[in-house]
Image (spheres, helix red, strand yellow):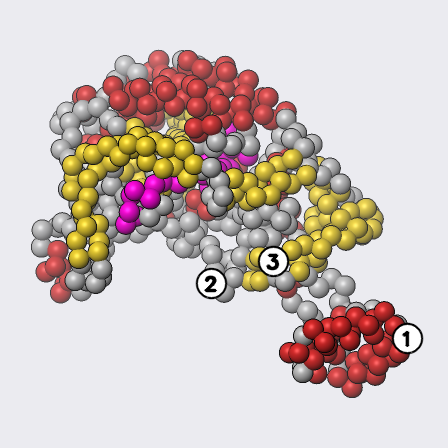
Amino acid sequence: MRRCLCLLPLLFFSAFAAGPQDFLPPAPPWHGASEVLLAPAGHPWITPAEKTGLTDSPGYDETVAWLKKLCAATPLVTMEEFGRTAQGRPLYAVLARRGGAGKPVLLAQAGIHSGEIDGKDAGLMLLRDIAFGGKAALLDHADFLFVPVFNADGHERASAWNRPNQRGPVHQGWRTTAQNLNLNRDYLKADSPEMQAMLALINRWQPALYLDLHVTDGVDYQYDITFGYNGSAGQFAWSPRVGAWLEASFEPMVSAALTQQGHIPGPLVFATNNRDLNAGIGAGVAGPRFSQGYGDLRHIAAVLVENHSLKSYKQRVLGTYVLLEAALQSLAAHGAELRAAIAADSAARPAQLPVNWSQAGAPTTTIDFKGIAYEEYLSPASGTKEVRWLGTPMLYPKLKVQLARSTLSLARPRAYYVPVTRPDLIARLRLHGLAVEALTEGKTARVDLARLVGPKSASAPYEGRHPVSFERLEWIPADEYYPAGSVRVPTDQPLGDLAMMMLEPACSDSLLAQGFFPEILQRTEYIEGYVVAPLAEKMLAADPALKAEFEAKLAADPKFAADPTARLQWFYARSPFYDSRYLLYPVGIER
Ligand SMILES: [Zn+2]
């Protein structure tokens, strides 16, 4: 086990005499059939977490050493390094395979938020049982590719004080990477070396099913394992056939297995108001910065798994084991249908792509919610009413579920042109596996260019960048010159929808919106007052229409009329001297 590196002043500890989280709401006692999965003490392949009775979780070195030992002892399990973290730790993917290649691949990843590490310890147990516990048949119809710890740097920032809302394990990693990036916001922009390695892994293995294993807090409820995906409960998915497969084949099998083993599976729960459960919960369509949204856009059956933080570590790990095993069984039973769905969605080229999802004005539905009772009390700390969860199961019948709707539909263009001046962007397109056509010589292309009107750079950073918004876009048809080395990105390819997400300026997930083009927001050439004044006077005298427009502006906008600089700038912006590239998004769109 790891040393606690906590540096909190000792004084603080007096407030936590009964343990760091004796202020957590109570958890109903739990026993389930899945407890039989635990290796008994003295078992030659007991996992490090099982040695603690699933109360603690091993450090990275101990985890990797255990897995290497397993690989050395069985031909069914091998391990590969697929990249390095920002701090230089090797990232490992473990492959469990029986026989040759060609089966559908289940990629399960633990520790993207490394304090939420249930998946790591569940995966080790399952791999052990595949190798030595009579479960090798799970590999008859699927390969199991397992990433034990995705955010390995965060995993080693371990402490008993990292996750105040979570009941165990004793030592928990940190949510973000050593670069303070949240990997589950980094799928599309791929700023971190960890995500760049993961995208390469996904490209190489082309998983059919992708499980991203987390732990969530929010409100209290009975469900110990929740999971969701785009397309759940009839909602939208960019890969509709894959979403339908998850709904018809994956969800029922996994939920039935969990229920049979004594767990309480449920849908993802995002309360509208954590202080008032009766306000309902929200359901949406995950965008491509998140694992399940990214997977959807790549035509992978991608599932976000969120164990509930208030359940014991043992209950959560055992539930995750059952889920992983059932996921492999779902591929055995329905892998052919999933492959057909992936092929059909990969071949589709929808003319319109719904984006920019919002719950405002969207329809609602209901759920009979397996919740926990709560009461309110006046907190002397907050000075207002706070929620006290009581640990008692309670059904909330017909609880409102707020769905989401798309507020923008993008017409599919033929292609995008990305100029050679942005090698970082071109590298990212390739990283995602997009096919791009590199121009061997310069070319003038007929494209639409977008100019940002009323741009706004966010005052606070988000994931290491400053997001950009704007009032509207002004579209300009142009014959734009793209030098050699620029790339044309056709949308007629399996990842064409993903290209649209990245490059359409109006898409709220685009690289533009995520702050990849700060340079276009700055004007870099100027005009002196003693030059622009006579220029403006000349323009007024020569152009009656301009004069009329100027006078109307003076009459309508007293603030403008009283601002000499603004008045002169108005003329400068309408003169041929003005910077024609100012606020111009440099990616061209071939309609
Ligand atoms: Zn998480």
Which region is colored magenta? 274-300
**Residue at 21% over, 23% down:** 262
List the single residue furthest toward the bottom. Answer: 530
Secondary structure found at label 2: loop
Q: Position of residue 337 (x, y in %)?
A: 50, 16
**Residue at 22% over, 54% down:** 386
Ligand 1 within 8 angstroms of badge 1 C-beta: no
* CB contact under 8 Å: marks 2 and 1: no
Q: In the picture shown, does residue 98 fall above or below 503?
A: above
Does the magenta portion include 289? yes
Report the side of 575 relative to 266 (left or right).
right
Q: Is residue 247 visible?
A: yes
Q: Is residue 572 visible?
A: no
Residue under pointer 3: 470
Residue under pointer 1: 542
Q: Nearer the viewer, residue 208 or 90?
A: 208
* CB contact under 8 Å: marks 3 and 1: no
Q: Amino acid at mark 3?
A: Phe
Secondary structure found at label 1: helix
Q: Position of residue 488 (x, y in %)?
A: 73, 42
Residue count near mark 3 (Cα–Cα under 10 Å), binned few <14, some 14–19, many ≥20 = some
Q: Which mark is residue 460?
A: 2
**Residue at 38% over, 23% down:** 251
**Residue at 82% over, 72% down:** 548
Residue count near mark 2 (Cα–Cα under 10 Å), binned few <14, some 14–19, many ≥20 = few
- Tag nearer the camera, 3 or 1: 1
